[in-house]
Image: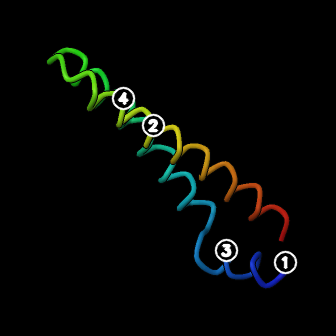
Amino acid sequence: MYRILHFINDIFSNYSVIVIMIVAILSLLFDGREFKKNGFIKERRIVEVISYSYITIAIIIFVLLRLD
């Protein structure tokens, strides 16, 4: 378990988690709105799923960084 935490700590920092979060939120807000306006419902749904998964992964990584 500690090996995995050290591996994650070596790869990610708090700043990279914040960048992942900001990119996911901006993609959700701007791309999702643009797809909805142009009528691309399936593409909007894909952007939502990817953005929410990025946000979830960023939160998990942030918690794992705090455990180490």
Identify residue for label 1: 1
Q: Nearer the viewer, residue 15 or 62?
A: 62
Identify residue for label 4: 45
Which is in the foreground here, disc 3 or disc 2? 2
Q: Amino acid at mark 1?
A: Met
Identify residue for label 2: 49
Location of residue 31 with respect to 23 vertically, above or below = above
Identify residue for label 3: 8
Secondary structure state at the residue bearing disc 1 = loop
Q: Earlier in the sequence, mark 1 or mark 2?
A: 1
In which quadrant of the rendered view does residue 40 lie?
A: top left
Badge count: 4
- The residue drawn where x is 36% and y is 29% is 45
- The residue drawn where x is 46% and y is 43% is 22
Location of residue 2 with respect to 39 vertically, above or below = below
The crowd level at tag 3 (other Cα within 10 Å; few <14, some 14-19, many 20+) is some
Quadrant occupied by the C terminus: bottom right
Label 3 with label 1: CB-CB less than 8 Å: no
- The residue drawn where x is 28% and y is 28% is 42
> How far apart are the two marked residues, 4 and 3, measured between alpha carbons?
30 Å
Q: Amino acid at mark 2?
A: Val
Which is in the foreground here, disc 3 or disc 1? 1
- The residue drawn where x is 53% and y is 62% is 16
Location of residue 23 with respect to 65 vertically, above or below = above
> How far apart are the two marked residues, 3 and 1, measured between alpha carbons?
11 Å
Q: Nearer the viewer, residue 13 or 24?
A: 24
Q: Amino acid at mark 4?
A: Arg
Q: Earlier in the sequence, mark 4 or mark 3?
A: 3
Q: Position of residue 61 (x, y in %)?
A: 67, 59
Label 4 with label 2: CB-CB less than 8 Å: yes
The crowd level at tag 1 (other Cα within 10 Å; few <14, some 14-19, many 20+) is few
Q: Nearer the viewer, residue 42 or 4?
A: 42
